[in-house]
Image (spheres, coloured by chain):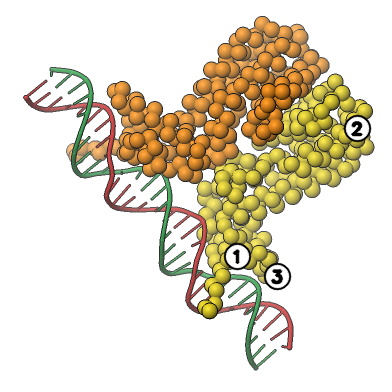
Chain colours: A yellow, B orange, C red, D green
Amino acid sequence: MVRRSLTKPRKAASQQRSRATVDALIEATARILVREGFDKASTNRIAEVAGVSVGSLYQYFPSKEALVVAVAERHQQEIMQTVRGELAEVLAEPVEKAVRKLIAVAVKAHRVDPKLHRVLAEQIPRVGKLEKLETLNPENFILFSRYLESHRDELRVHDLELASFVCVTTIEALTHNAVLHHAKMLSGEAMEALIDEGARLVTGYLKG
Amino acid sequence: MVRRSLTKPRKAASQQRSRATVDALIEATARILVREGFDKASTNRIAEVAGVSVGSLYQYFPSKEALVVAVAERHQQEIMQTVRGELAEVLAEPVEKAVRKLIAVAVKAHRVDPKLHRVLAEQIPRVGKLEKLETLNPENFILFSRYLESHRDELRVHDLELASFVCVTTIEALTHNAVLHHAKMLSGEAMEALIDEGARLVTGYLKG
DNA sequence: ATAAAATATGAGCGATTATTCGCTTTCGAT
DNA sequence: ATCGAAAGCGAATAATCGCTCATATTTTAT
């Protein structure tokens, strides 16, 4: 039997050289997305910017979509690093304090890499394998639900799952729109005002 | 001097035949977007589904992007038809009633053509001329601001512009996510519950 | 009836793109 | 020093797509 060609992309990169290649490719993709936009992010251009060949790109990523997913996942990881930490610290605090801190951290999360965040949210067509690329991380629902459960007695909401949906959706939308679409709100002062309003909105809802 | 070729797309379609062509093209684009997705919406395919030639397409639309914009605008028109009417009726009502009705109408608006709405929101890359294709219609801010102004004495918010941003963003995000991403909430009962929660959220915020 | 204007046609051009594969270079273990 | 495996290379391919234009048909006005 003839030897299989098997040019299928291998998953793991075992040597440190190839790990560097993978990093360079993800980084190059992110840079192009931010600086030139999604439709300029062709595989050949990505390879060029990464300083490797297209062939190498396809050794580690089975498709262009896979690269975009990798970029999105790396970004999500960075954001959740921030959010998870704060949520742990806030678990013991009463609703007023906790909600305010969570909104503040949501703002901080949207400022990790706003330009990339915006491109991922607005320029990536959710088609094919990109379909489940969600802006709203499901983990947020779970984490917030846990907080609500452990503070049930402070609350005047009956359906905790529904309340979690309402709160997470609201906080995400407010911070997303403020940071990415309303330049006026970027000043420290205006941002404080927005956090105040958001906290009032959500706290009032939770405490009746 | 030689005669100019001037194949630039003409704006107006004066005869009824050409108006039908324009309609067929917009309708075909919408159908393809919903049934096959954005990346299947090539100009050749659109023309084919519309039952006209590609050449005719370019008589009335200077680019593929222009067609998508036309579809989005038609959709927005239909939605705003619904919203404008309700907002007028609600102008005289107190905050509790008004907010509840506005959330209900937002749900209704998202149900006009949910599949198209979702494709427009998630599959169209905001690039080039599509960049200003906004999900959040600026008209909503203006209309809602007017309502707040004429009910200023009922409210405990100081910055009306900020309050309008908070409310419109919140209502849009809640209804959008509920209708387009949470199948469980589509039942009449669950939808009522969501409207109740949303109304409580926003009313509580506005009235202190 | 006739001519001009409006409308419609669709093969094909040029450009771009994702992906492949035969080959070379480098690495790591012996 | 040797050799197999891992990593890297990039010209070439095949397909797609937006768009044009020379030509044909239909409508309107006279």
Establish if B126 lies above or below C13: above
- The amino acid type, in three-letter code, at marker 3 is Ser
Residue A147, quarter of picture: top right
Is label 3 in a helix, a strand or a loop? loop
Residue A167 at x, y = what percent?
A: 77, 30
Which numbered tag is attached to residue A114?
Answer: none
Residue B145 visible in the displayed image: no
Is label 1 in a helix, a strand or a loop? loop
| Residue closer to the observer: B79 or A43 | B79
Chain letter of mark 1 equals A
- Eye-nearest disc, 3 or 1: 1
Q: Quadrant of the C terminus of chain A?
A: top right
Q: Which residue is drawn at 38% across and 35% down?
A: B50
Q: Which residue is drawn at 49% across and 41% down?
A: B36
Residue B19, quarter of picture: top left
First in sequence: mark 2 or mark 3? Answer: 3
| Residue closer to the observer: B114 or B162 | B114
- Give the alpha-carbon distance from disc 2 to disc 1, as whole Å: 48 Å
Residue A143 visible in the displayed image: yes
Task: Give left or right: position of B86 versus B194.
Answer: left
Establish if A39 lies above or below B89: below
- The amino acid type, in three-letter code, at marker 2 is His
Q: Mark 1 points at which residue?
A: A9
- The amino acid type, in three-letter code, at marker 1 is Pro
Q: Which residue is drawn at 93% across and 37% down?
A: A92
Residue C12 at x, y = what percent?
A: 28, 52
Quick one: label 1, few (<14), some, or many (20+) residues within 10 Å? some
| Residue closer to the observer: A167 or A121 | A167
Q: Name the residue under label 2.
A: A151
Task: Give left or right: position of A86 versus B7.
Answer: right
Q: Mark 3 points at which residue?
A: A14
